[in-house]
Image: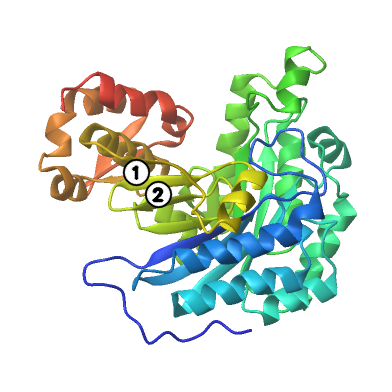
Amino acid sequence: MKVPCSSKESSAGILPGGIYIHVPFCIQKCLYCDFYSITDLSVADDFLHAVQTEIRLRNKTDNLFDTIYIGGGTPSALKPLKIKTILKAVFSSFAIARNAEVTMEINPGTVDSADLTAYRKMGINRLSIGIQSFFESNLRFLGRIHTAGDAEKTITAARSAGFTNISLDLISGLPGQTEKSWINDLEQALLFSPEHLSCYMLTYEPGTPLDRKRKKNLFTPLEDPKAGSLFSITGQFLSRNGYQQYEISNYARSETFYSKHNRKYWRFHPYLGFGPSAHSFSDHVRSWNHRSVETYIENLGREILPVENTEILNREQQIMEFIYLGLRQTDGISMDDFYRQFGKRFETVFSGTITFLENRQWLQTKEGKCFLTPSGMLLLDSIADMFLQNEPL
């Protein structure tokens, strides 16, 4: 199945949108993950029917979509024919741009060469591979099902299948991790010349098995200063090796390989989400689906959209998200965009906070942009709060 050339155009003034499909299945839950997924694949066929129904019920838009992202969970836990069925429903229901970025998340240990070839033939042109580490001890700590050897085989097989846009996920900040061991992970990743890298810092999300182990003192978390040092090393090392940082956790060999889909979230472009727990957004209205696969399937079996709730962002929420999402990106906040959207000059409204942060070298302003320094990025949440707490809107 090929990505079609659409004859439709976006409605006047509407930016091209993104489509996200949440596949809620995993072979085994990772200890650190709090994304919604289940390990019972016996309901996969019922889910497949339900998601096709949701796509059909929500196709009442003439907007053009230029990104599709299949995430999870572990989408590659499903056989390629099931993924193809979902994509076919999307392509037949929505206007998809000829050059659409079509991403699928895959995990080593769940795919082989035949699967990867099938994904490529059905129109998927970008892979996000959940490597996390090339060290066996790290993989065991995180509860991954694959080995370092599996990871290397998967990347090699993806290249052989024809993928020329590959992103690798890595996690830093693990207990006992040193600068040397983290650089070794990065060096191993670069041996495969990925077009994109997502380098996340380990967080202990409430309710996850890893957080429960932490609370029982079954291991000693890496100290914050050491974790922060690894973050700084990541940017420096990847910059020396030809990668551009464009968001706190994301790096690419050039702007061509920035994740077009994820940038929609950060830049308030419209997107539709399908599947349990998936979110949708358009024109300051956000909605999200029920988190339960059972509820999702039951609703759609009755031709009812599985929306759990909807919210209309008020002005303060819009400003809060504009600042937070803008500061995540290395381009930072466009002061002109802020003025166009809210009718006030960013540099005037927040002059006190800007001066405070600049004096501590956590923030810079240049050429109409306001952006965090590398040390400021470590304090993103606190800095975003400062903008909203210290200044009248």
Residue, x 46% and y 30% (percent of image)? 375
When the figure is inspected, residue 5 is found, relative to residue 364, above or below; the finding is below
Residue, x 24% and y 32% (percent of image)? 316
Give the label on residue 326, or none. 1
Residue, x 75% and y 26% (percent of image)? 210
Under mark 2, the amino acid is Trp
Q: Is residue 59 left or right of residue 369?
A: right
On the image, the x and y values in percent for residue 214 come to 74, 18
> Residue 204's image quarter?
top right
On the image, the x and y values in percent for residue 41 come to 80, 53
- Considering every residue shown, the one lying at the far front of the view is 302
Residue 253 shows in this picture: no
Between discs 2 and 1, the one toward the N terminus: 2
Residue at image mark 2: 266
> Residue 107's image quarter?
bottom right
Instruction: Answer whether labels 2 and 1 touch (C-beta < 8 Å).
Output: yes
Under mark 1, the amino acid is Gly
On the image, the x and y values in percent for residue 365 come to 25, 40
